[in-house]
Amino acid sequence: MRISVVDVGSNTVRLAIADARDGAPLPVHTAKRRLRLAEEVGGDRRLGPRAVERIVESVADAYGVAERWGSEQPFAFATAIVRDAPNRDEVLRTVREETGARLRVLPGEVEAELTFLAARRWMGWRAGPLGVLDIGGGTLEVAFGRGRLPDFAISLPLGARRLTREFLPTGDLAPEAALKELRRHVRHQLRDVAARVRWEGPVTMTATSRTFTQLARLCGAPAGRHGPFVGRTLTRKALRAAVAELAALPAARRAELPGISAPRATQSLAGALVGHTAMKLMNIREVTICPWAIREGILLRRIEGDADWWTGELAAAPHRPAEVAKLRLAAQP
């Protein structure tokens, strides 16, 4: 069985095609297309006509590639930049009408659960109690669990793109006052979640997402060309130095640093600050960079035979403890 997933993010649309064999998604082909949706978002977070046009073109292209590679119809989903848009329903309807593709938006907690599932399968049971951090463009996902699925999973509005827009919008050298205000904001949002993670005391802490991968590379981790099986870690001490290094440069020059790509250069400082603050509050000295994340989590759900989940309406998973909702509400300003 050949399956695929289309991930519509703030910077790119990514297509991952895999063969479902021996219980794992074995990579067959990947493709990406630049979107830069953040450039087309207004102050009210609405996606403008050009942004919608880019999404339609990219999704149609991804579906065409998946078909040429012999994949069944992809599972297509959009992250926070579409999920939080006031005209979200209009965007999803337009994509359906123009391409025939059903673009879904996942609740943030479901994204965290899927990412945890992928991290658990990658790290294995030897990892013991497992914690996961994932910094996206719009949100930060945190999950912890001792089994296949997390005991709690939460999504907070602490994405790198979102915080850059709110606290560091100019792209110039970041004023110290703005950085202090941003750190206070992150600490406030993370307070209750961090206390829970400290209490759980995970044996292994992992980090996923392009943000963490690029920050790890900046801090000396092996480059991506060495493959996914090379061990990569990121220490809190190194990330603290990375925050200072990124803050000393305007956004245009951060892309000259190892690992920092031009499309993510502007938001790299906010991402580093969120990552360092989270690790400090949670008393985490080191994270292991996990190459599997939400896309692999979705593929794993399909491999496990959950066809209703793959084709049906999505909602928060029924196993989620009620305390997660309390944590999420407590973390809001």
Image (cartoon, rainbow, N blue to C red):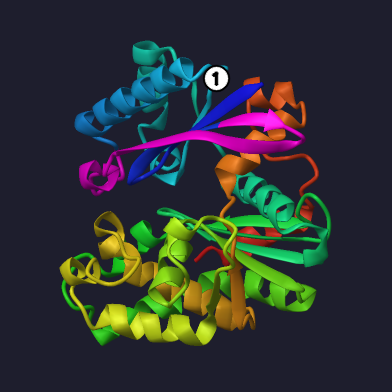
Q: Please indicate whether residue 206 sits to the left or right of residue 123 in the image.
A: left
- Whether 66 is drawn above or below 333: the answer is above
The answer to if 127 sits in the magenta stretch is no
Of 5 and 107, the residue lying toward us: 5
Give the secondary structure at mark 1: loop
Whether residue 74 is visible here, answered yes or no, is: yes
Q: Which residue is mark 1?
A: 71
Q: Residue at x 60, y 79 (%)?
A: 286
Q: Residue at x 56, y 83 (%)?
A: 280
* Amino acid on which disc 1 is placed: Ser
Residue 265 on image: x %, y %: 27, 63
Number of on-image labels: 1
Q: Is residue 164 left or right of residue 172?
A: right
Hey, which quadrant is residue 134 in on the image? bottom right
- Say few, some or many: other residues with alpha carbon within 10 Å of mark 1 (under 14 / 14 to 19 / 20 or more): some
Quadrant in the picture for residue 99: top left
Q: Which residues are magenta?
A: 18-46
Quadrant into which the N terminus falls: top right
Q: x, y (%) of residue 120?
A: 73, 54
Decide if residue 301 is on the left or right side of residue 165. Answer: right
